[in-house]
Amino acid sequence: MKYLRFCFLLVIILSCNIRPENAETAASYFNIEELLNREINYLLSQNAGLEKSLVSNGESELVQLKPKSKEEWKEQLSLFFDANIDKPGFKDAYFEERLSPLSGMSKTIYSARTSKTPVQTFECLYTNDILTQINIELVEKNIVFSNLRSLKLYFDPKGEHIIGFDVTGNENMQLKEKMQFSIQAVITY
């Protein structure tokens, strides 16, 4: 009889949903990757295109593209995908600060705790609780090169869809000429 009670108690204990200590491995910051994947599906459904103005070391070029697949859109937005801070490896890597609304505008800022993290700041700007812009500052440095980039993603007034993006930056590499560049892109329909 004691054996039967012990087995019954053991079954009850083992059937409880006990959460392991490391169950919360996600960083729980703003997940730009999810947002971009949803947006790519929308852009493909609308047969959207992209008009890009590129400037590199004073030379400019205007490019019009019509990405036809998810992979092509991901390539165009790759810098933003690479700047996703909501990854398990970034848990506790950022300070989070929410600035109170001022005239309906508010901001959430994620600041890197160390200079070794490539995404140094990730800001979400809201107007009346609607996401209108994302600003990202990336810094990569080592003994061979330094790379500074500023990324901006713009949304329509309803905060539903991306209307364009800007990328500016400079690269400084040993034994190579310093390069400054900027990209301004607008979604076309």
Image (tube, grey):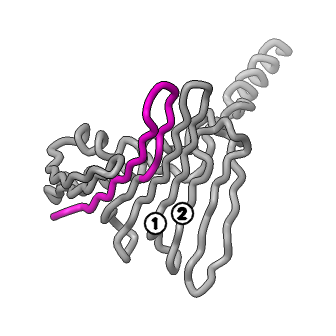
Image position, residue 170 (x, y; %): 47, 45
Task: Locate the C terminus by quadrant.
Answer: bottom left
**Residue underneath mark 2:** 124
Image position, residue 7 (x, y; %): 75, 17
State yes or no: discs 1 and 2 in contact (Cβ < 8 Å): yes
Numbered circle sitting on residue 133: 1
For the stretch drawn in magenta, what is the main secondary structure?
strand
What's the residue type where badge 2 is placed? Answer: Cys
Picture quadrant where residue 78 is located:
top left
Locate residue 49 relative to residue 150 in the image: left or right: left
Locate residue 63 relative to residue 21 in the image: left or right: left
Image position, residue 25 (x, y; %): 64, 35
Q: Is residue 147 above or below residue 50?
A: above
State yes or no: residue 185 in magenta: yes
Q: Residue furthest right?
A: 2
Label 1 crowd bin: few (<14), some (14–19), many (20+), radius 10 Å: many
> Who comes first in sequence, dot 1 or dot 2?
2
Residue at horizontal 41 percent and vertical 59 percent from the top: 153
Numbered circle sitting on residue 79: none
Task: Locate the N terminus by quadrant.
Answer: top right
Locate residue 3 relative to residue 149 in the image: left or right: right
State yes or no: residue 119 in magenta: no
Image position, residue 111 (x, y; %): 67, 52
What's the residue type where badge 1 is placed? Answer: Gln
Real-space CA distance between mark 1 and mark 2, rounded to the nearest whole angstrom: 6 Å
Q: Nearer the viewer, residue 25 or 100?
A: 100
Magenta-highlighted residues: 168-189
Residue 37 seen anywhere in this rendered image of the structure: no
